[in-house]
Amino acid sequence: MIRLLLSGVGSLVGTNVLESLQRLGRDRFCVIGINSVADAANNFDCDVCFLVPPVADEAGYQSALSAVVDEMRPDLVIPCRDDDVVAVARWAATSGVPALVGGAAMAEMMRDKWLTCQWAARHGLPFAESAVTPEAAHALHARWGMPMIAKPRKGDGSRGVRVLTRASQLDAVLTMPGMVIQPLLAPPEDLSPWLEDDRAGVPLWSAPPDRAHYSVQALVRPDGSAEVMAAAINVMVCGIAQHTRLERDPALVAVGLAYAQALAADGWRGPVMVQCRRLVDGQYVPFEIGGRFSGGTGLRDVLGVGEVARVLSAFLPGVVLDDARRGELGDVALRCPQSVVLRAQQVSTLQATGRWQAFG
Amino acid sequence: MASVWVTGHRGYLGECVVRCAADRGWRIVTTEGRLQDLPAASVVADAVIHCAGALRHRGDAGQHASHVDGTLGMLGALTGSVPIVYASSRSVYGAHVGDRIPDGAACRPVDAYGRAKLDAEQSIAMSGSTFTLLRLSVLIGAGVSRDGEAFLRTALHTARAGGAVSRFCPDRAHDALGVWTAARACVAALEAGPSCRIYNLPGPARSMHASLAALMLVVPQGTLVDSWAGTAPIPVLDSSDWVRDFGAIDQLDDMKLFAAWVQWLEAGGQSGLPEVDRFPFGRN
């Protein structure tokens, strides 16, 4: 049985990895989850789950992670969220336990969109123009116009991201610490009505249309070689891929592979995801990268890509997880809501004891 | 670069690539028969220039077998992951609106050849190997033992036979690329180190009417007939990325090209001629 430890198992990426493991044959794996949130549904899809301090409490998190690893002896540690990637990379540098990470500095770079921009420039890779000072942001505005987009440098899950349509909004955002400003590349044609149609009030729930979100999922193997596992075009709703179609354009693959190879050269190991926009001239321009699986991993899995299988096969010596479904499935994957049952006792056990274990 | 496997080494472009690669002092690796019939992991080379894939096949099945199955055969026959330069085609772009096609423009192939080339590109891009894809314009000129299939070649043969060549549309740009220029580009791309890039590689955009006029000066037994049908101009490939990384593609001298072509044909079309379109590629 393959023993996997998922850090941040309650996250969207955790859901995607668990979905993939389910399709590979769940009984082949012992899944050890760690999470700082007790009532996440994914906790109870694990064989055993531990409640740990949030990664912001670095010492507490690392101590808890070490204790779990000492007890459970996982074959591989898989960080799910960007914060987990950084925390696991720092921990792995001294632990000697196999983990899907490279150096901590690279993990930090990928989490911080401004550092990513600078790193990409040093490697001659395309990346969305970015600014962190008012002067640079205004220069960016002068070159690109509106709309622009403001993001927390170290945010994840689209939290705190703002679409800017007016100069006054740019000025306001620039007073907020830790923001990076980018042009909103290739804005959808129907974005303006969404932004401006507030004559009859603001919808309680709404999300900008995003039907042209391109992504590449690559892999840097332990020996430093890199491959692109999948490229896709996604329809995003509230930052989550709801509709995915595999994309065949070699230009998109080329951008993803170039990133993976540059990351490999700088010591990264493990999955790499690259999110892109496509400009009018056809050029793919990344605007975020990450050293992890993504929220589309499960969608691509049902299309036969088998990212999790390929990564595990690369990182676990002697493990071959053939994905016989490759290429035999459909063209489009849709994410559908799923109902799950949580028993109060499960959550209370995890909260009270810091540990929940499946039996039977 | 110790050794390079040139696929399609007996083809129009491949023969020229072999010559150019050998000029670099590289050891040339070749294989016989269909690439898809090669045993797995049977070819040892430090790099590949993939020229195999014929234009002559008809229909999706034939083109797929030639380009996609052949490419998958090449990838499977390699021992390990090595840099690959692929001589692809502008056909992957298909129907395009506008005057120019930028590097990385959307691909909408409209024929079996373009679809197969795009599928083959995709296979290489997804193989895990480092690659450079060269989207070549129509190749022209005398190669080592053959000439190509371009319109200008047909026009030249027609004119030499004393026939009439139709100027079938108003004057427009065309960008036929000398086969030796393409061959040296393949070698230059490999020498620079494939870097997951896609380059458009057009010939210099020239006037179709001017080229045909030059042809008639070299082959006076032919005649020109104007037969305009209002055909829309074909967009010219934008080569700005290539020019940025490798330098300008010099102008091709039509008169010299056609003169050398005629000389080559009159000599039997089997021996190398002075390479009139041999332009230096200087990497910036």
Image (spheres, helix red, strand yellow):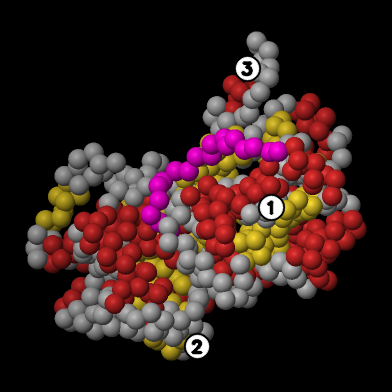
**Residue under numbered circle 1:** A358
**What span is colored magenta in the figure?**
A326-343
- Percent from the top left, x then y, of residue A133? 83, 43
Residue plotted at (62% across, 70% down): A315
Spatial CA distance of label 1 from label 3 is 50 Å
* Residue B34: % across, % down: 27, 76
Amino acid at the residue labelled 1? Ala
Q: Residue at x 66, y 18 (%)?
A: A203
Nearest the viewer among B211 and B234 is B234
Q: Relative to B229, does residue A358 appear above or below in the rendering? A: below
Tell me the quarter of the picture where residue A319 sits. Answer: bottom right
Instruction: Tell me: A94 left or right of B23.
Output: right
**Residue B267 belongs to the span the image colors magenta:** no
Give residue B145's position: percent from left, percent from top. 24, 79
Residue corresponding to mark 2: B2
Mark 2: amino acid: Ala
Residue A114 as seen in the image, left or right of residue B140: right
Residue at label 3? Answer: A197
Select label 1 or label 3 by which is in front: 1
C-alpha separation, residue under disc 1 versus residue under disc 2: 57 Å
Do discs 1 and 3 share a chain?
Answer: yes
Q: CA distance from mark 2 to mark 3?
A: 64 Å
Q: Residue at x 87, y 34 (%)?
A: A175
Q: Are marks 2 and 3 on the same chain?
A: no
The chain containing the residue under callout 1 comes to A
Which image quarter is the N terminus of chain A in?
bottom right
Q: Secondary structure at mark 3?
A: loop
Lateral position of residue B150 relative to residue B187, left or right: left
Q: Residue at x 51, y 84 (%)?
A: B1
| SS for dot 1 | loop
Q: Height in image: A210 above or below B267?
A: above
